[in-house]
Amino acid sequence: MALFSLRFGGGQEGSPWHPLWVDEHVIFPSVAKGRKRGAQQALLSLRGITLSYPLGWRQWLFSSLSAQLRAPSRCSLSICSYSLCLFLVFMVCASGKLCAAHPTAENEGKEKGLFSALRERVELVGFVKNETALRLRSPRQFSKVQNWLQVEVEGELTRWAKLTAIARVLVDPVNHLETHIHDFNAAPVDRWEVGDTFEGELRELYLELQRGRFDARLGRQQIVWGEAIGLRILDVVNPQDFREFILDDFVDARIPLWGARLNYTLGDWTLEGLVLPDFEANRPADRGSEFQFRHLPTPALPIQPPFPPFPAVQVSPVKEPADGRLSDAKIGTRVTRVLRNMDLSLNYVYAWEDFPIPFRRVLRPNTFLIAPTHERLHLLGGSFNYAFDVFVIRGEGVLTLGRHFVSDNPDDADGIRQREFLAYMLGVDWTVSDNLAVNLQFFQTAIFNKPSDIPDETVNNALSLFLRADFWNETLFPQLLVLYGINFNDFLIRPLVRYDVTDLWSVAVGMDLFVGSRSGFFGQFAACVHPPDRHYTGCNDRVVFEVKRSFSL
Amino acid sequence: MRAIILFLVGLLWATARLLGAEELAGEPSGREIAMKVYMREDGDDQVSKAVFTLINNKGQKRVRETLRYWKDYDGKDGLSSKTFIYFSSPPDVKDTTFLNWSQKDPTADDDQWIYLPALRKVRRIAAGDKENSFMGTDLIFDDLGDREVDEDEHKLIRVEHENGVKFYVVEAIPKKKDYIYSRKLSWVHAQHWTVPRIEFYDRKGQLLKIMQTEWMQVDGIWTWKRTVVENQQNGHRTEIDISDVKINQGLDDSLFTERSLRSGAP
């Protein structure tokens, strides 16, 4: 039996050849950030091993908040204080807006004061949303009944400075998307949990500055690059939350990072620089949860020693870059150019592997050590689009220098090999008619000079088709997204219909269907397999419902 | 009997001509009128607020509030103008922005981008998208842009008078085949060169929608005050109320870039 046949065949988050495509035993032990406590030392429990390590700069900076933001725990004073502050800010803004909207003789004077100033400088928008998913096959049950409240507050500090905060709370009385077994570095990130059904998260908090040709965004944010729909190729800066596989909107699945983005615009050229001294890893779905990647080890099934000489396996904590240390920062740059009918970009990121690399070595006779480590990477990329008539040709690609792949050669010293890895997309948008738009994309990844002991596909191909129509003056939106993994003949099919009942109310119903080989990235959730320790491996077809009420105050 | 009917019809036609129309001789050509409209002074740039009210055939209303920034390029860099539109309401579309670079060359497609906050992504859209409804209104992208005179063949159909005001009725037929409109009829104010009424005909030649516009003068420049577009086929209606018009503000070129799409209105 192979020791590690983790398929490091694929580059980007959400791609059908993603590293998390696991066939056998892979070890991502728990150094769960969500288990960090608000002290300078965090205690980590990992398979009976107690470890400690220093916390990062954010805990210092936001000492009164971030300990709880990062720590899933029962409701504490800090959580309550934070919630109270948020609520008060909300109410003050709301009062200002409401008074402004309905001025009376009594409040007219006040309106000219605080509330007036707030009304002019503060904007608040948000939504309340219910997202419900029903499994179509055994066990037929609701896998999520998520009730969201998301609030975005935007304050204009000066003519050239703006502060934005986006926070959300989520109540899910069902929540089969999590099991709280976060052993695979799957801890909550910059959020807090109360019990099994409530979580809150400060999604983004940033200051925007704009002076002349320069502009900057400082704080916790998302950096969005690329042209692709449905899968992420050049969208490499923020890590991804896979609790809901790749079904969640990317804007919700991206894990925001703290840092700075600087832009300099000169005519049709823009130079962008990124410094993100914040590290977060990708977050796989919890073990035993709805979208757990298949063949992950479970607590009930400890990692089996694969070779007779090594009856014992030890797992060291994940070695992560330090938060706040500039030398560990993720650094990137992008140059964009607008031409006639065409946009071009060149991108570079000095990044980290978003999943830990399970290096292995013999610790001592009969003992085998797995030392998961996040390693540095150089990513070179680019994108283009070209518009003509009713078409837009799009493309993007990333060349990863020295990507890490797991070897299945038991004689390999550390079980890891490095190879250059290319991922790219070519696609076209086609405006078929006034009411119908089509997007077709081809994805390919390639491992250069792949040795035989890397089990991943040398070349992996996928296609996607996205259809979107609108009717009734853009109030009814049927759409269909089909992702097809060519190598394993597997599909993800996502029909959806949304109806905007009013400006503020919308409803949607859709399906997520998995078809094809279990070996495929999409097909892994197709076949019905129910090992005793897992309930949801396969048969994940579902119906989704959404009701959303937007608001602004 | 047939002779009497023909006589009555002829009399009716002659009366109508005498009451409401004039001979075309001595009037400018359709293209000259279109050029007058096109060349009407509209300043170097404009900033305005526009509230779009969308009303379906059941009377249900939806409201979109926008800020519009427009700058005249007058052929510089091959451009006719640039337009930047920011959506401030409703909350579901807030921070959506749209940028159009209108090409001077009538055979060239415009450059257009849209920023969708739900995706956090700027996407270039095909020029063919100009024929799509603009955010659910009864207008298409092309109705909002600066359509070049030579993109259509213009013909003066007739001259009408209403309340003592003279109007030229000009027919415009697009040169591009399969354009969303087979023709447009515009009523052009003979003194101001404003256009208070336009009729749009679909590909089959059927009346599709009627756009009626009230005009106002700001700093001596004629600009929209209120526009109502009624779709004659599905009963949908769009009302556009313009306010806070500012002209010649010296808008910087940097406003009409991808950076502004992401950062929103200044």
Image: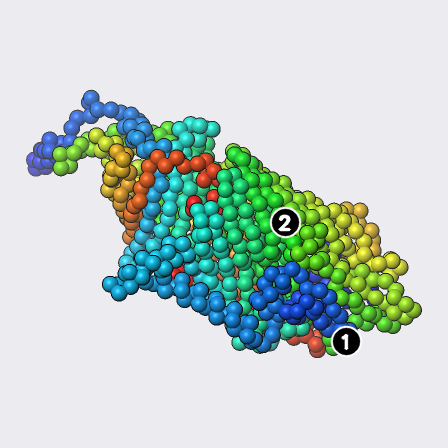
Q: From the viewer's perspective, tell me whether residue A500 is left or right of residue A29.
A: left
Distance (Cα) linking label 2 and label 1: 37 Å
Three-letter amino acid code of the residue under disc 2? Val
Q: A31 and B84: which one is in front?
A: A31
Residue A275: mark in rendering: 2
Question: For the point 76% across and 54% down, which residue is it?
Answer: A404
Q: From the viewer's perspective, tell me whether residue A522 is left or right of residue A309.
A: left
Residue B31 visible in the shown view: yes
Question: For the point 54% across and 72% down, which residue is it?
Answer: A79
Q: Residues within 10 Å of mark 1 (few under 14, many from 20)?
A: few
Q: Secondary structure at mark 1?
A: loop
Q: From the viewer's perspective, tell me whether residue A480 is left or right of residue B156.
A: right
Residue A252, image x, y percentages: 55, 60
Which chain does the numbered disc 2 sit on?
A: A
Q: Which residue is mark 1?
A: A48
Residue A350, image x, y percentages: 69, 48
Residue A125, image x, y percentages: 43, 59
